[in-house]
Image: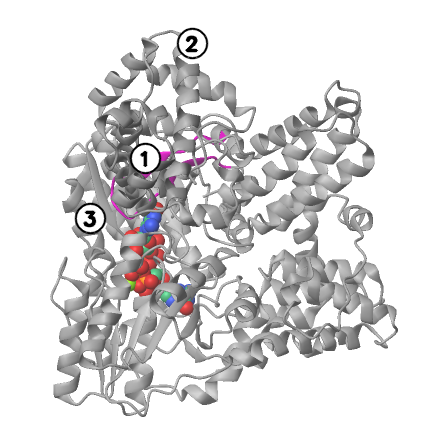
């Protein structure tokens, strides 16, 4: 059960199993529980209701159509954007109502905390481990009140993610080659569009390679992103050999003296052996021109994905040596709690998070901001 | 898909089967395991709690405790409840309407809506002999319309053109008018992906729905979705009168908990599974079979259907006749079977449908790949004709020779022979049944075996 923590110093002795209590605590009218949470929140806490209603403002789709809008200063926006968008999360909502209804420091509180973690996709194993650790500390009277317990949980969560908070530095190599990979529909092409925007705003020369030659109109999609950002795209069209497109692009990047080359690839399930091997081939072909390329293999994960993300990363890492992650679609109610399991198991840096569909909806990953969005420190005061 | 969940549950379930007597204590323990298994499979927590609660009520009641074989009875309760959530028989699309019957697609970004439109178009054209038109109301995603246009061309259906600057409602109305003019049976309407918390976009699709009054409104959801599946499904079901669900990307190794969550939360049937990127990768969904699969019994009916579609009928007939006549299943036959398997797209797609396979540990399953099949075929190829017909001849030294010849280890050869023997045993059982086609035979035989949780030999 506590395998999740096995690499940690053996400070946490396995908690005594409590099957009976756990089952009973989970008892009455469970199906209605989430609604009840939402309601008690809406009526019970005006401040939070307010926070919620302004959370995740729907990105005006029309805004996206204006290709060369003035770039926002991304850094200044980062923190505010994070908090703002994540504050409305089911996780934060669940927790806020939780602390309002349970000012008391007891086992019920912990059980509900576990529920909240599970529904944020943190996973049953990790959630249980986190909560059992808190339970042990609570019984040792380590916490003065619910607020202190929450602070401890927050710290635990931040600690898990701090090691993977390593931004991507694209300097030092020219061209710096980024190979983007991931399963179908997670947001690879969109993320490339956002990266193109970010890096050209930083004054870098960017080139894109349309390595998805399989999916209908994938090349067109990337070309549109290129046009929006005034960034050139190398392509050969539908059904061309992906490795050869990307190889050509690297040659072009060199001769044009470009700073960053970002290559798109077709989405593929990690279970599809043949397609996975194709990725290996792309990486090998690049090495013929530059022994160190690709300098970053960026794997994109859909933030709404549940525990399957672990299996995805395992396979991609094995085949193409993933060096960094991007977690997309965190602007909805899914909070991508599986990142805790990913951090634990693979320790791969999380480079960016995607918070929307437009060019500027990409943020550098920041462990504290991420956890703050999930667990605002002010919650326990309610 | 579903296999890991079924693996977890079948361990629990098998343990229960063995029990002569159930106590409240071990029922509780089992339910706890069921709960964990469901959560690990990404079934949404409220759904897990409801399910476990219902099983608990029935399990501690008369039904199970007083029954002659309580383990079996509890298994039945779990199975019943899963089935109750999933629904029973397959629900087809309802297209009985003054044509054109309009089908509206809705879902989150990247779920697979556009691809599913193409798959449905092909399905309706080829299998239901409908005249189909498709239209894209996705005026946001770059090249979304182009994507649908390309796919429509691929599957050979009418495409109603639209442009990024247009209003989705106008596009859809225009398409309906065109569909009427061109006497189309079904109009499939693709929409942009949207978040359920995006009020403007949800208002847009509501308006679209009101304007075109579709006979089917399908919610498309990625089978890898985690706990959020419940929130999302609930919001979409509140915004739109959904008539069904399409579960995509089931060709991966997701445990498929989202299927249970979405079904439970929306109350709408899952009508199709998307199982690949190609336009033929759409399967009508049979909930009863999935509940069985989750419990480790294998989705034998779907497997048989797939086999019927893809297998080399001639060879199958030959083998069937041979087996029927009581002749022995030999290594040549095994090689043919293995090659058929590769023809059917390899093991990955078949694995989770085989009874008993779900019980194999992951470490074993990950080794079962098509390379393994090729290796097995290579081993058989390295035997003499006589050895293939009379496997008993293969003594130690012959096995060593075969191993050298095929570049494998003697242990590989031994394993292959063991698998052969298991298959042979099964085949001889089949032949004793007597009857018409082998496939029909298999259907019956495997159904019978399902309850024992085992059938085809584990590969390696
Ligand atoms: N809400 C939201 N949507 C996103 C985000 N990132 C991408 N999307 C949307 O997700 C959908 C799929 O994105 P793509 O970039 O096409 O995904 P992909 O991984 O390239 O897909 P394939 O190439 O088909 O495998 C599109 O509708 C995007 O607009 C994000 O951070 N938030
Ligand atoms: N392996 C697999 N891939 C699928 C399946 N269905 C769709 N895809 C892939 O998933 C990705 C996204 O599919 P789309 O059809 O573009 O998804 P969408 O919902 O229309 O996306 P948006 O319009 O951006 O919201 C593409 O790469 C598809 O090829 C499936 O059943 N299996
Ligand atoms: Mg793409
Ligand atoms: Mg689409």
Identify the residue under disc 1.
Answer: B398
* Label 2 CB-ligand 2 distance < 8 A: no
Provide the chain ID for the residue under circle 3: B
Q: Answer whether residue B239 is visible to the viewer in this image.
A: no
Number of residues whose C-alpha sits closer than 10 Å to that of mark 1, classed few (under 14), some (14–19) or many (20 or more): some
- Comparing labels 1 and 2, the label whose residue is closer to the camera: 1
Identify the residue under disc 2.
Answer: B433
Q: Position of residue B207 (x, y in %)?
A: 38, 51
Real-space CA distance between mark 1 and mark 2, rounded to the nearest whole angstrom: 35 Å
The image quadrant where one finds the N terminus of chain B is top left
Real-space CA distance between mark 1 and mark 3, rounded to the nearest whole angstrom: 54 Å
Q: Which residues are magenta?
A: B268-287
Q: Are marks 1 and 2 on the same chain?
A: yes
| A123 displayed left or right of B160 | right
Figure quadrant of residue A173: bottom left
Residue at 13 percent of width and 87 percent of height: A256
Image marks 2 and 3: residues in contact by CB distance under 8 Å? no
Question: Which of marks 3 and 1 precedes in the sequence?
Answer: 3
Number of residues whose C-alpha sits closer than 10 Å to that of mark 3, classed few (under 14), some (14–19) or many (20 or more): many
């Amino acid at each position: 059960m506590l395998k999740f923590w096995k690499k940690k110093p053996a400070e946490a002795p396995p908690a005594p199993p409590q099957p009976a209590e756990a089952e009973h605590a989970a008892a009455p009218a469970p199906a209605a529980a989430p609604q009840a949470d939402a309601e008690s929140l809406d009526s019970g806490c005006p401040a939070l209701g307010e926070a919620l209603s302004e959370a995740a403002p729907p990105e005006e789709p029309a805004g996206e159509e204006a290709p060369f809008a003035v770039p926002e200063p991304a850094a200044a926006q980062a923190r505010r954007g994070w908090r703002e968008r994540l504050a409305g999360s089911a996780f934060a909502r669940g927790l806020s109502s939780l602390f309002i209804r349970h000012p008391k420091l007891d086992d019920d509180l912990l059980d509900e905390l576990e529920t909240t973690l599970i529904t944020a996709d943190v996973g049953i194993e990790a959630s249980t481990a986190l909560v059992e650790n808190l339970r042990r500390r609570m019984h040792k009277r380590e916490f003065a009140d619910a607020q202190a317990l929450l602070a401890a949980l927050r710290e635990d969560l931040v600690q898990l993610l701090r090691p993977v908070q390593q931004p991507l530095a694209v300097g030092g190599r020219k061209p710096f080659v980024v190979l983007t990979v991931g399963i179908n529909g997670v947001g690879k092409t969109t993320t490339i569009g956002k990266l193109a925007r970010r890096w050209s705003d930083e004054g870098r020369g960017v080139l894109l390679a349309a390595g998805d030659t399989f999916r209908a109109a994938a090349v067109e999609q990337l070309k549109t992103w290129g046009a929006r950002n005034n960034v050139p795209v190398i392509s050969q069209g539908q059904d061309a050999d992906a490795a050869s497109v990307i190889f050509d692009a690297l040659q072009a990047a060199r001769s044009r003296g470009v700073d960053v080359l970002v290559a798109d690839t077709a989405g593929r399930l990690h279970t599809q052996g043949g397609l996975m091997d194709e990725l290996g081939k792309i990486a090998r072909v690049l090495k013929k021109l530059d022994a160190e390329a690709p300098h970053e293999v960026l794997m994109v994960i859909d933030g709404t994905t549940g525990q399957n993300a672990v299996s995805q990363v395992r396979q991609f890492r094995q085949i193409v040596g993933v060096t960094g992650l991007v977690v997309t679609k965190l602007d909805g109610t899914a909070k991508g709690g599986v990142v805790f399991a990913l951090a634990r198991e693979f320790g791969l840096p999380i480079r960016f998070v995607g918070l929307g569909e437009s060019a500027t909806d990409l943020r550098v990953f920041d462990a504290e901001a991420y956890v703050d969005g999930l667990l605002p420190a002010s919650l326990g005061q309610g | 898909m579903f296999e890991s969940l079924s693996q977890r549950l079948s361990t629990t379930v098998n343990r229960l089967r063995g029990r002569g007597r159930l106590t409240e204590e071990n029922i509780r323990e089992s339910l706890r395991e069921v709960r964990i298994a469901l959560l690990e499979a990404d079934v949404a927590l409220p759904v897990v709690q409801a399910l476990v609660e219902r099983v608990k009520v029935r399990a501690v009641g008369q039904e199970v405790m007083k029954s002659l074989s309580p383990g079996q009875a509890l298994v039945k309760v779990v199975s019943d409840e899963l089935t109750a959530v999933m629904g029973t028989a397959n629900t087809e699309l309802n297209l009985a309407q003054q044509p054109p019957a309009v089908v509206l697609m809705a879902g989150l970004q990247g779920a697979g809506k556009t691809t599913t439109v193409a798959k449905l178009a092909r399905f309706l054209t080829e299998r239901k002999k409908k005249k189909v038109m498709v239209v894209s109301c996705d005026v946001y995603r770059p090249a979304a319309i182009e994507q649908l246009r390309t796919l429509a061309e691929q599957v050979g259906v009418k495409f109603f053109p639209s442009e990024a600057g247009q209003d989705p409602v106008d596009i859809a109305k225009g398409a309906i008018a065109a569909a009427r003019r061109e006497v189309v049976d079904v109009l499939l309407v693709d929409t942009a992906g949207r978040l359920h918390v995006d009020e403007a976009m949800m208002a847009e699709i509501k308006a679209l729905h009101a304007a075109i009054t579709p006979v089917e409104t399908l919610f498309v959801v990625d089978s890898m979705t985690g706990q959020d599946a419940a929130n999302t499904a609930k919001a979409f079901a509140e915004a739109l009168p959904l008539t069904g669900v399409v579960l995509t990307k089931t060709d991966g190794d997701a445990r498929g908990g989202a299927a249970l969550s979405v079904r439970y939360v929306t109350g709408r049937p899952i009508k199709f599974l998307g199982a690949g990127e190609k336009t033929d990768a759409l399967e009508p969904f049979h909930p009863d079979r999935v509940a069985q699969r989750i419990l480790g019994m294998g989705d034998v009916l779907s497997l048989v259907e797939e086999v019927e579609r893809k297998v080399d009928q001639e060879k199958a007939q030959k083998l069937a006749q041979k087996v029927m006549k009581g002749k022995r299943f030999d290594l040549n036959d095994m090689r043919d079977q293995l090659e058929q398997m590769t023809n059917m797209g390899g093991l990955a797609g078949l694995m989770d449908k085989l009874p008993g396979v779900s019980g194999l540990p992951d470490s074993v399953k990950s080794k079962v790949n098509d390379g393994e099949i090729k290796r097995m075929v290579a081993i058989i190829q390295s035997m003499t004709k006589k050895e293939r017909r009379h496997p008993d001849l293969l003594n130690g030294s012959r096995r060593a020779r075969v191993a050298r010849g095929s570049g494998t280890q003697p242990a590989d050869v031994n394993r292959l022979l063991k698998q052969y023997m298991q298959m042979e045993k099964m085949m001889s059982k089949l032949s004793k049944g007597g009857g018409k086609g082998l496939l029909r035979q298999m259907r019956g035989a495997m159904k019978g075996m399902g309850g024992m949780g085992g059938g085809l030999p584990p590969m390696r």
